[in-house]
Image (cartoon, helix red, strand yellow):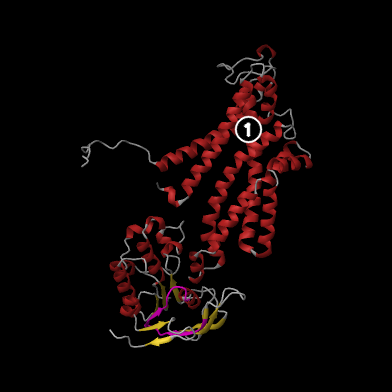
Amino acid sequence: MTTLAPPQIRAPKKQSNRRQQTLWTIGLCAFFLAAVIFSTWVIGDAGLNPVLTQRNQSPSLAHPFGTDWLGRDMLTRSLHGMSLSLRVGLLAATASAAIAALLGLAAGTLGGWVDAVICWIIDVCFSLPHLVLLILIAFAVGGGTRGVIIAVALTHWPSLARVVRAEVLQVNSSDYVQLSHRLGRSPAWVARHHMVPHVVPQLLVGLILLFPHAILHEAALSFIGIGISPHLPAIGIILAESMRHLSTGYWWLGVMPGLLLLLSVKAFDWLGENLRALLDPRTSQG
Amino acid sequence: MLTGEGLWFRYAPQLPWVIQAQTLAVEPGEVVGLMAPSGFGKTTLAKLLAGYLAPTKGRVSVDSQPLPRRRYCPVQLVFQNPELAVNPRWRIDQILREGHPPQMHQLDALGIHSGWLTRYPHELSGGELQRIAIARTLNSQTRYLIADEMTAMLDANTQALIWQAVLDYTRAHQIGVLVVSHDWPLVRRLCDRILDLAADQDHCTLVSGVAE
């Protein structure tokens, strides 16, 4: 026979529930990402100029990320790079999500040969190695920032399009949509009230979870030299430059921007996961 | 009168017939039982009569009029699984208001608490959700109710409570009910007459005047 612990009478601790924690996480991640994007307006371009007297300094209070071989402040450069990368990623991921929404909705609602053609395109895109396709498209449209945006936008939609298509098909064939028609609701009403609440959260979360991919691939393209042009402080370029200096002991040139990249990508990931939890009725009130 | 005349149905031309030459009629205010073992097309027949599926041959009509394609259908079907018949992202009061909103005393008769109205479907049990699905169809526009194994997953007590409320309503408003079930004692208790699809595959056999 187990004995129960004596009931402890004490005032319930003021503890935030999981919904509040989720909201806090979303707010914090969004604030961090917005801060990175808009930081360039605040700190200005001053740190980007070479100061030859302050070359190769390790991280200190004056320069939290250290300085590089020309005496440029690495914090300023990393923030500029991250801000540029985030904006490029934002644009590319949004374009990608728009393509995914359009094709997914078309495949799911029109069906027939339209569905067959779109599914075939999705399969073709999936069968090609991702990075090879990225390099090919970026190279074909002439590289540079424009090339990166187009390449990332054109390669990241297939998985999301497939999710949207599946969602549309599932909702369309469900008992409650058929019942809605029998209750006298028009197709437009059904689309607005049954379809949209299912597709929009998928799309929103899909879009946010696309960012990390877009940013990492943008960094990868810049790293191998066919992405953003070398004079711009993109995060991929900073990392590529730091490679030459890592062996000489200037670890902060690679580690600090790398950490910033990692943190930004994780922030998007947390944002997406928590938004998904918030938008799904099954988890939104837990 | 709800009638299905010479109903034939198959899902595709190369597939076998699911429904063959079925003819049946439900009068207003009448409770008709439809019995058959699993796989005899009870649910398919129910979906044909409620307009969810179009018969390959034959016609379904209410008072000699075909079922409306776009307006509120006077024949309403209550599904076996209420979890699939409600949008999981909607709150209960929104689900109830999708058709013609039911009246408050109707909700009380079915044992629906007002506290449920602000919840999501996954926060109610199957039995509670089925009451919501039934309440959604009990309004002045519904002339015929098709209950496809409506209470099959409920305990005997709830089953009795729900059928009591439904039959009170349908008798008061002269609504015809088709009880699709393979629960013989239930069908015998509820229905004025019983159709048995299994008795003869080609014709419905009318078992009129059920001995109590």
Find the magenta span and give its range.
B20-40
| Crowd tier of the residue under label 1, counting other residues whose Cα lies within 10 Å: few below 14, some 14–19, many 20 or above | many
Can residue A220 be seen here? The reply is yes
Asked whether, in this view, residue B189 is left or right of residue A23, the answer is left
Q: Pick the quarter of the image with the C terminus of chain B.
A: bottom left
Asked whether, in this view, residue A272 is left or right of residue A249, the answer is left
| Residue indicated by mark 1 | A83
Q: Position of residue A241 (x, y in %)?
A: 70, 24
Q: Pick the quarter of the image with the N terminus of chain B.
A: bottom left
Q: Position of residue B2 (x, y in %)?
A: 45, 83
Give the vertical position of B112 relative to B12 (above or below): above
The image quarter in which residue B200 lies: bottom left
Residue A260 forms part of the magenta stretch: no
The residue at 49%/42% (across/down) is A274
Q: Nearer the viewer, residue B9 or A156?
A: B9
Considering the numbered disc 1 on the image, is that residue within a helix, a strand or a loop? helix
Q: Position of residue B183 (x, y in %)?
A: 35, 74
